[in-house]
Image (cartoon, coloured by chain):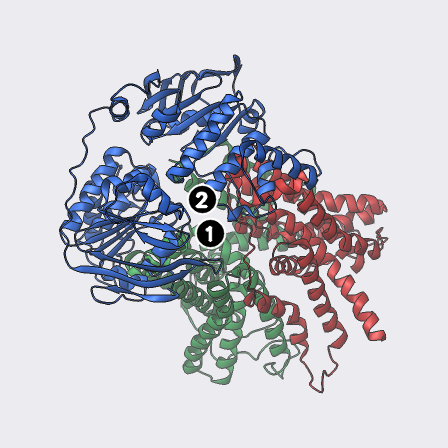
C-alpha cells in the first residue's frame, strides 16, 4: 500500500458517496442495503450465485484472450450470438439432444463470431479492440433482426424466441447451485491446469507476455493468437448458451447488455492466475446484485451500478499494475 | 438530384460528431495514449450540456459545461494512465463505464420534466467547426513547436525526455485537447437530438477511433474516413426499406453497414504501418 | 563534481566519486560496464538526482532537477543509442526541444542548420526522414544538435560503439575542432586506444569508485596495459590464441538474398560456409544487413533467393524445427527477444526449448527438470540471482545476458548464432563467454557471431566476414583493423 493508491481508493469512494448524498439518498442505508442485496438471505444469495455463473464463464473467455495478449471486448457479441444459436437449436430439437447440440452450436457460433477479429489481428495487425466492438454492434443488429423475424415466437408479442421446452435443472436448492456455475468452476480448474502445466499453455502465455520473444522461441505466434481468440469466442458462446439453458429459457432482444464490460472486469481482477477468476466473478456478481437492489429499494438510478463497477476496475487495475511495475523496477 | 442534396447535407451532419471525436482521438493517440474513451467523454459532455442548457437557459454555459465535463474525465484518464500506469485500454473501458453510469445517474436525478426549454446552438455552427478542425490540427502538427513535441513524445517518450521534453505534461495537454473536442462533439449530438437519451452517442466514439486508425493517424485522411462513415450512415437512412438494384436489403444490414465497413477497412488496412511508435508506452 | 554518491535501492552505483573537467579539453571517463560511468554522466545531465554530493558548472553550483535544466545550463549529452527519433525528419530532430519559436518556419531553420553543418564539414538532407541515417550520419546529427543548443559541455557516451575505425577517427577530428573553439568534451568509452590517441585527461572508475584521475601521457610506454589493469582491478590475461581444428561442414549459405522491412535488398547474395570447430565473426556497421541475415538464419524471415544447408541437407523451414535441430541463438535485443521479463528464471530457461527434454515431455511441463536445468544454466557464467523462482527482471542487464548466453550453450548445440553476445558484459564475463563458446565448438559445433565491436571479434573469433550495405565479404584471417574497416565502408 502506498499513499497514492490509498488516495485513489479514498477518492473513488468519496466520489460515490458524494454522488449519492448530493442526490439526496441516505448513504449509510444505501451501502448497508447493497450488502443485504447480495448476501441478505439464502434466497438472495442464490440469486447472486445465478449472476456469478455467466460472469465466471464470460470472464474466463476474456481471461483466455488476455493471457495471449488480446483484449476481447467482443465477448458481448459472441455471448449474444452463442445464446441465440443455442436457443434456436433447443427450440427446434426438444429434449437433452437439443440441449447438447445447442450448447455445441453456441460455442461454434461464438468462435466464428470471433474469427474476423482474430484473423485481422494476426494477419493485418488491426487492433482487436476496434474490430470486436464493431462485431458487437453487428451482433446486436443481426440477432435483433432474427428474433424480430424468422426466429420470433409467433405466439408472443415480444421480440424473443419461443421458450425452450426443457431447461437444465439446479444441482442443489439452498443455496441454489446451477449447472452453469459447476461448468464455470470446472472450466476454470481445467484452464488452470492447461495454462500452468502444459507446454501449449506455456506458449500461450509467452505470446501474451512478449510476442517477439515468443517468435524467437519457435512459437507460431499467429496460430496461437488465432486459437486463443477462437477459444475465447467459444467460451463466450458457452456462457450465452448456458444462460439460455439455465436462467432465461429463451433468447430476447438486448440479451447481453453490459456483459462484455463486466467480464472484462472479472478477468482483470483475477490477475494472472485462472483460479483468481472464481473470487473475482463472485465479487462482481455481488456488486452487481447489490447495486441493482438499491436501484429498486431506494430509486437510485441504475447508472450507479456502472459507476461502482467502473471505480472498482480503476482501483483493481491500479493495484495490479502497481505490483507489476514494482516487480520490474526492482 | 434532391436525393443527392439530402445525401450531402445528411453526410455532413452525421460526420460532424465523428470528425470532432476523431480529432480528439488524434491528439491523444499521437501523443502516445490509446484512447478508447472517446465515447464516454462525448456522453458525459452531452448530459452536461443538456442539464446546464435546460437549467440556465444559456447556450454558452451549456457548451462550457460539456467541454468542462469531458475535459475533467480526460484529466482523470491522464491520472490513471500516467500516474498509476494503468493499461490504456483498461482505463478507457473504465472511463466509458463511469460516463455511461454517470450520465444515466445525472440525467435521471436532475432532469426536471416540467422544464424542457433546452438552450443550444444551431448544429451548422458545429458543422463549420468540425470541417475546419482537421485543417487546424494538420497545421498545428506540421508547423508548430507544440505539434512537433506532441509527435516526438508519441513516437518515443524516452528519447524525448533526453531532449529535455516533459512527456507527461505534453500528454496532459493533449488529453485536455481530447476533452475539448469530445466536449464539442457531445454538445453537437445532444443539441442535434434536442434532448438527452441514455447511451445516445451509440458507438460514435468507436467509429471515430476506427476512422482515425484507417486514416493512419493523420488529420486529413481521418477526415475523409469520417465522411465515408457518415455517408454510409446517411445511405442507410435514405435507402432502408427501398429496394436497391431490385434487391431488398434487410434493415439490419443497412444498420450494420458502418460497422461492417470498419471491419473490412481494418482487414484491408495495408500499406505503411503508421501506428505511433510510443502508443501505450509509459 | 565532488563526492557524488548514487544509490538505486540498496545498490550503490557511485560511491563518493569526484570529477574535475577542465574547460577546453577532451576528458575520457573509462571503466567496465557497471562501473558507474553512464550514471555519473546522467547525474550531470540532470536525468537522475545524486543521492549525495554536489557539482558545479563554470564555477556555479548546480542541482539539475531534469535534463531541460542541464540543457539550458549549456550541457548536452549524446547517449550510446542516440536520441534521434526515427519517425521525424532530420531537421525536426535537430530542433526538438529548442525550436526557434512557437511557429516553425523552415527556411531560416534550414539556413541555420546548413551553417552549422558547414562549420563541421557535414552535409545533410534536412527534409529526409531520420530513419534513413547511417550510424555515422546519426552521430553527426547528434553533434549538430549539441551545436544547435549552443552546448558548451558535451557528453558523449560510447560515441564510437557503432562506428567504423575510419568514422571514429573522423569523429574525434570533429571533437578536436569543437574543443579548439572553446567547447569542453567528456567522452565515456571503454576503448583505450582512442583515449590514448585523442584525449587530454582520463578518469578511471571501477565498481562505482574512482581509481585513477590523470592527464594522458602519450609517451608512456605501457599506458594501455596499465589503464586496462586499473579498469579491471588486476592484471589482464590475454586468452590463448585458439587454433581452430576444422571438422565437417555444418552450415552452407549459398547466394542467399533477404529483403528488408522496406522491401530493399538487405542481404545481397551471401555466400559462406561454417565448419565444426570454428568461431566466425561478422563485422560491419550497424544496419549493414546483419539483422536480416540472422533473421533468415533463425527462420523468422523468409529468404528471397538462394539456399541454406544444414548438415548437408536443406535447413528446416520454421524456427521451431531449427531449434529442435540443435540450432541455438542469442538474439540481439535481450529485453524484447530473448527473455520474458516478468517470468521466473526457470520459465525463461525453457524459452526456445519448451517442447524438449528436460523442460517437458512434449505436452506437459516437467517442472523439476526445468528447475534443475535453470540452476545449471545460471551456474555456468555465475549469474547472480536471488531465487530460481524470481522474475528475470530482478537481475541486472549483465546477469540477464549471462543467463541468455548460457542457455544457448546448454545441452550440446550444433550451431550457435550470437548477435552482440557481449552486450552489457564486463571484460571478464566476455572472456568467460568466449571460452565456453570455444569449448562448445571444439566439441563439434560451429558459431557465427555478430558484433559492432571490431576489437571483440579480432580478439575472439577465428575468421571474420564483413558486411557492408548487404554485401558480404570474407576478410579471411586478416587481423588488420584498417583493412577490415575499409571493407566495412566498402572502400576496398
From this viewpoint, which residue is outermost toward the top? C59
Measuring from the top left, give residue C294's x and y in whole percent: 34, 55
| Residue A69: quarter of image | bottom left
Measuring from the top left, give residue B125's x and y in whole percent: 83, 53
From this viewpoint, which residue is outermost toward the bottom? B246
What secondary structure is marked by label 1?
Answer: helix
Does residue B197 appear to the left or right of C23 in the view shown?
right
Q: Image quadrant for the N terminus of chain B?
A: bottom right
Residue contact between numbered discs 2 and 1, judged by CB atoms under 8 Å: yes
Answer above or below: position of A107 versus C348. below
Looking at the rendered structure, the number of numbered marks drawn on it comes to: 2
Question: Looking at the rendered structure, which numbered label has been put on residue A320?
Answer: 2
Have a look at marks 2 and 1 and say if they share a chain: yes
The disc, 2 or 1, on the residue closer to the chain's N-terminal end is 1
Is residue B64 in view from this perspective? Answer: yes
Closer to the camera in the image, C251 or C432: C251
Measuring from the top left, give residue C368's x and y in whole percent: 19, 51
Measuring from the top left, give residue B201's x and y in whole percent: 69, 58
Please name the residue shown 46% across and 34% down the image: C79
Q: Which residue is mark 1?
A: A268
Answer above or below: position of B82 versus A248. above
Chain letter for the green part: A
| Residue B268: quarter of image | bottom right
Question: Looking at the rendered structure, which numbered label has been put on residue C418?
Answer: none
Does residue A273 appear to the left or right of A309 in the view shown?
left
What colour denotes chain C? blue
Closer to the camera in the image, A76 or C365: C365
Q: Residues within 10 Å of mark 2 (few under 14, many from 20)?
A: some
Answer above or below: position of A321 versus A134. above
Answer above or below: position of A91 versus C269. below
Closer to the camera in the image, A185 or C202: C202
Chain letter for the red part: B
Amino acid at each position: 500500500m502506498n499513499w497514492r493508491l490509498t488516495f485513489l481508493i479514498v477518492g473513488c469512494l468519496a466520489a460515490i458517496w458524494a454522488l449519492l448524498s448530493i442526490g439526496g439518498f441516505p448513504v449509510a442505508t444505501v451501502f448497508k442495503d447493497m450488502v443485504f442485496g447480495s448476501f441478505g438471505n439464502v434466497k438472495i444469495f442464490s440469486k447472486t450465485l445465478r449472476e456469478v455463473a455467466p460472469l465466471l464463464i464470460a470472464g474466463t473467455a476474456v481471461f483466455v484472450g488476455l493471457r495471449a495478449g488480446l483484449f476481447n471486448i467482443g465477448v458481448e457479441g459472441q455471448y449474444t450470438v452463442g445464446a441465440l444459436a443455442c436457443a434456436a437449436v433447443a427450440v427446434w430439437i426438444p429434449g437433452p439432444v437439443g440441449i447438447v447440440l445447442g450448447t455445441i452450436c453456441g460455442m461454434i457460433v461464438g468462435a466464428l463470431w470471433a474469427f474476423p477479429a482474430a484473423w485481422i489481428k494476426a494477419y493485418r495487425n488491426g487492433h482487436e479492440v476496434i474490430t470486436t466492438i464493431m462485431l458487437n454492434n453487428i451482433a446486436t443488429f443481426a440477432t435483433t433482426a432474427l428474433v424480430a423475424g424468422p426466429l420470433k415466437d409467433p405466439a408472443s408479442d415480444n421480440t424473443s424466441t419461443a421458450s425452450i421446452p426443457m431447461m437444465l435443472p439446479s444441482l442443489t436448492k439452498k443455496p441454489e447451485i446451477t449447472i452453469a456455475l459447476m461448468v464455470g468452476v470446472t472450466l476454470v480448474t481445467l484452464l488452470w491446469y492447461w495454462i500452468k502445466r502444459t507446454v501449449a499453455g506455456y506458449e500461450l502465455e509467452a505470446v501474451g507476455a512478449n510476442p517477439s520473444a515468443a517468435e524467437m522461441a519457435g512459437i507460431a505466434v499467429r496460430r496461437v493468437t488465432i486459437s486463443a481468440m477462437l477459444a475465447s469466442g467459444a467460451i463466450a458462446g458457452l456462457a450465452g448458451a448456458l444462460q439460455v439453458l439455465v436462467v432465461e429459457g429463451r433468447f430476447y432482444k438486448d440479451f447481453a447488455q453490459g456483459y462484455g464490460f463486466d467480464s472484462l472486469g472479472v478477468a482483470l481482477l483475477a490477475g494472472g492466475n485462472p483460479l483468481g477468476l472464481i473470487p473475482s466473478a463472485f465479487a462482481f456478481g455481488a456488486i452487481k446484485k447489490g447495486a441493482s437492489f438499491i436501484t429498486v429499494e431506494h430509486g437510485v438510478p441504475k447508472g450507479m451500478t456502472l459507476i461502482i463497477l467502473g471505480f472498482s476496475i480503476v482501483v483493481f487495475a491500479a493495484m495490479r499494475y502497481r505490483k507489476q511495475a514494482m516487480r520490474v523496477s526492482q | 438530384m434532391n436525393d443527392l442534396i439530402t445525401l450531402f447535407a445528411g453526410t455532413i451532419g452525421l460526420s460532424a460528431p465523428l470528425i470532432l471525436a476523431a480529432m480528439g482521438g488524434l491528439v491523444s493517440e499521437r501523443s502516445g495514449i490509446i484512447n478508447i474513451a472517446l465515447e464516454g467523454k462525448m456522453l458525459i459532455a452531452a448530459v452536461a450540456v443538456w442539464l446546464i442548457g435546460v437549467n440556465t437557459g444559456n447556450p454558452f454555459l451549456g457548451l462550457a459545461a460539456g467541454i468542462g465535463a469531458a475535459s475533467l474525465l480526460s484529466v482523470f484518464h491522464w491520472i490513471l494512465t500516467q500516474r498509476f500506469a494503468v493499461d490504456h485500454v483498461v482505463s478507457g473501458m473504465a472511463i466509458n463505464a463511469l460516463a455511461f453510469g454517470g450520465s444515466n445517474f445525472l440525467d435521471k436525478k436532475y432532469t426536471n420534466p416540467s422544464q424542457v426549454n433546452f438552450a443550444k446552438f444551431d448544429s451548422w455552427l458545429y458543422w463549420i467547426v468540425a470541417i475546419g478542425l482537421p485543417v487546424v490540427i494538420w497545421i498545428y502538427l506540421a508547423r508548430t513547436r507544440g505539434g512537433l513535441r506532441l509527435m516526438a513524445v508519441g513516437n518515443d517518450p524516452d528519447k524525448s525526455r533526453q531532449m529535455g521534453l516533459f512527456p507527461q505534461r505534453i500528454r496532459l495537454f493533449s488529453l485536455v485537447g481530447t476533452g475539448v473536442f469530445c466536449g464539442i462533439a457531445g454538445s453537437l449530438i445532444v443539441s442535434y437530438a434536442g434532448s438527452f437519451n441514455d447511451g445516445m452517442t451509440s458507438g460514435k466514439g468507436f467509429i471515430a477511433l476506427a476512422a482515425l486508425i484507417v486514416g493512419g493517424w493523420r488529420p486529413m485522411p481521418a477526415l475523409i474516413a469520417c465522411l465515408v462513415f457518415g455517408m454510409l450512415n446517411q445511405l442507410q437512412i435514405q435507402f432502408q426499406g427501398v429496394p436497391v438494384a431490385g434487391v431488398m436489403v434487410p434493415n439490419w444490414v443497412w444498420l450494420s453497414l458502418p460497422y461492417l465497413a470498419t471491419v473490412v477497412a481494418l482487414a484491408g488496412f495495408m500499406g505503411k504501418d503508421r501506428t505511433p511508435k510510443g502508443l501505450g508506452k509509459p | 563534481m565532488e563526492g557524488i554518491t548514487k544509490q538505486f535501492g540498496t545498490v550503490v552505483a557511485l560511491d563518493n566519486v569526484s570529477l574535475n573537467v577542465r574547460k577546453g579539453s577532451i576528458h575520457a571517463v573509462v571503466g567496465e560496464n557497471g562501473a558507474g560511468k553512464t550514471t555519473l554522466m546522467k547525474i550531470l545531465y540532470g536525468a537522475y538526482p545524486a543521492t549525495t554530493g554536489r557539482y558545479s558548472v563554470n564555477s556555479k553550483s548546480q542541482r539539475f532537477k531534469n535534463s531541460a535544466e542541464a540543457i539550458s545550463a549549456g550541457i548536452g549529452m549524446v547517449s550510446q543509442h542516440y536520441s534521434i527519433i526515427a519517425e521525424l525528419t532530420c531537421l525536426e530532430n535537430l530542433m526538438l526541444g529548442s525550436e526557434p519559436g512557437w511557429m516553425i518556419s523552415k527556411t531560416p531553420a534550414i539556413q541555420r542548420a546548413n551553417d552549422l553543418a558547414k562549420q563541421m564539414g557535414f552535409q545533410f538532407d534536412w527534409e529526409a526522414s531520420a530513419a534513413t541515417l547511417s550510424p555515422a550520419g546519426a552521430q553527426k546529427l547528434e553533434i549538430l544538435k549539441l551545436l544547435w543548443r549552443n552546448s558548451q559541455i558535451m557528453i558523449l557516451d560510447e560515441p564510437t560503439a557503432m562506428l567504423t575505425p575510419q568514422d571514429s577517427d573522423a569523429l574525434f577530428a570533429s571533437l578536436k575542432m569543437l574543443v579548439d573553439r572553446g567547447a569542453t568534451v567528456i567522452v565515456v568509452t571503454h576503448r583505450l586506444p582512442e583515449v590514448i590517441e585523442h584525449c587530454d585527461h582520463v578518469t578511471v572508475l571501477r565498481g562505482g569508485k574512482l581509481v585513477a584521475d590523470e592527464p594522458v601521457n602519450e609517451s608512456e610506454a605501457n599506458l594501455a596495459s596499465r589503464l586496462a589493469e586499473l579498469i579491471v582491478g588486476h592484471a589482464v590475461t590475454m586468452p590463448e590464441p585458439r587454433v581452430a581444428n576444422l571438422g565437417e561442414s555444418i552450415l552452407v549459405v549459398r547466394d542467399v538474398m533477404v529483403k528488408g522491412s522496406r522491401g530493399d535488398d538487405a542481404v545481397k547474395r551471401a555466400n559462406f560456409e561454417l565448419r565444426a570447430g570454428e568461431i566466425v565473426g561478422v563485422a560491419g556497421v550497424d544496419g549493414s544487413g546483419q539483422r536480416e541475415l540472422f533473421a533468415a538464419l533463425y527462420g523468422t524471415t523468409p529468404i528471397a533467393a538462394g539456399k541454406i544447408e544444414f548438415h548437408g541437407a536443406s535447413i528446416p523451414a520454421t524456427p521451431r524445427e531449427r531449434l529442435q535441430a540443435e540450432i541455438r541463438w542469442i538474439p540481439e535485443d535481450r529485453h524484447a527477444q530473448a527473455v520474458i521479463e516478468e517470468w521466473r528464471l526457470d520459465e525463461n530457461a525453457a524459452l526456445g526449448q519448451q517442447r524438449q527434454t528436460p523442460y517437458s515431455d512434449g505436452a506437459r511441463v516437467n517442472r523439476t527438470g526445468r528447475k534443475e536445468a535453470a540452476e545449471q544454466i545460471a551456474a555456468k557464467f555465475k549469474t547472480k540471482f536471488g531465487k530460481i523462482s524470481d522474475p528475470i527482471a530482478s537481475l541486472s542487464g549483465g546477469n540477464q545476458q549471462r543467463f541468455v548466453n548460457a542457455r544457448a550453450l546448454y545441452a550440446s548445440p550444433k550451431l550457435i548464432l550470437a548477435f552482440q553476445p557481449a552486450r552489457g558484459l564486463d571484460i571478464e564475463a566476455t572472456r568467460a563467454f568466449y571460452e565456453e563458446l570455444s569449448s562448445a565448438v571444439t566439441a563439434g559445433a560451429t558459431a557465427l557471431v555478430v558484433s559492432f565491436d571490431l576489437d571483440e571479434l579480432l580478439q575472439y573469433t577465428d575468421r571474420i566476414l564483413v558486411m557492408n550495405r548487404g554485401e558480404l565479404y570474407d576478410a579471411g584471417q586478416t587481423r588488420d583493423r584498417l583493412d577490415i574497416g575499409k571493407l566495412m565502408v566498402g572502400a576496398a
